[in-house]
Image (cartoon, helix red, strand yellow):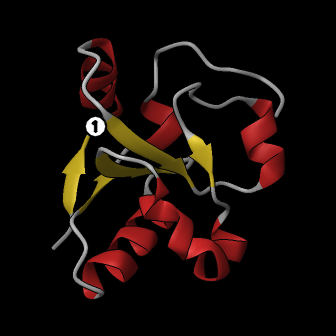
Amino acid sequence: MTKEISAAELQQLLDSEEIINLIDVREPEEWEAGHIAAARSIPLSVFQARSNEVFDTDGEVIIICHSGGRSNRVCEYLAGQGFDVTNVYDGMLGWRGDVTVGE
């Protein structure tokens, strides 16, 4: 089973300045419409081809998408390979913090 946190818990981690490796797996149009500034974009549609990029950055790996479904699939995929990852179960729908628009 994948570890999970809420968007509110993610906000607390970001506010505490804990080092996290936040990856947004939404597609480019969704990303550009509004994303968390601390996140990196690795869209689900190309995730397998770019999965080697996940661990290019230090910190706990946390995966987010729109509502938690796609990010959960990515977490299950990575956990199946032995990696410790966390899903934001309510995704951007639960996010109440600031968002950055555009690339």
Q: Quadrant of the C terminus?
A: top right
What percent of the width, then of the height, locates residue 64? 47, 48
Q: Nearer the viewer, residue 82 or 68?
A: 82
Q: Residue at x 22, y 52 (%)?
A: 4
Whether residue 54 sits left or right of residue 89 in the image: it is right
How packed mark 1 is, by other alpha carbons closer than 10 Å (few <14, some 14-19, many 20 or more), is some
Q: Indicate the amino acid at tag 1.
A: Ser
Residue 88 seen in render: no
Examine the rendered structure and indicate whether residue 53 appears above or below residue 66. Answer: below
Q: In the structure shown, which secondary structural element does the residue marked by tag 1 occupy? A: loop
Name above or below for residue 19 compared with residue 42: above
Residue 63 position in % (x across, y down): 42, 53
Q: Is residue 97 left or right of residue 8?
A: right
Where residue 49 appears, x then y in whole percent?
A: 66, 82
Which residue is rendered at x = 54% and y = 74% of the image? 51
Task: Determine the residue positioned at 31% across, 12% down.
Answer: 15
The x and y percentages for residue 33 are 79, 32
Q: Which residue is mark 1?
A: 6
Residue 27 visible in the picture: yes
Q: Quadrant of residue 98?
A: top right
Please, which residue is most extreme toward the bottom here? Answer: 81
Q: Quadrant of the N terminus?
A: bottom left
User: In this image, 31 relative to 6: left or right?
Assistant: right
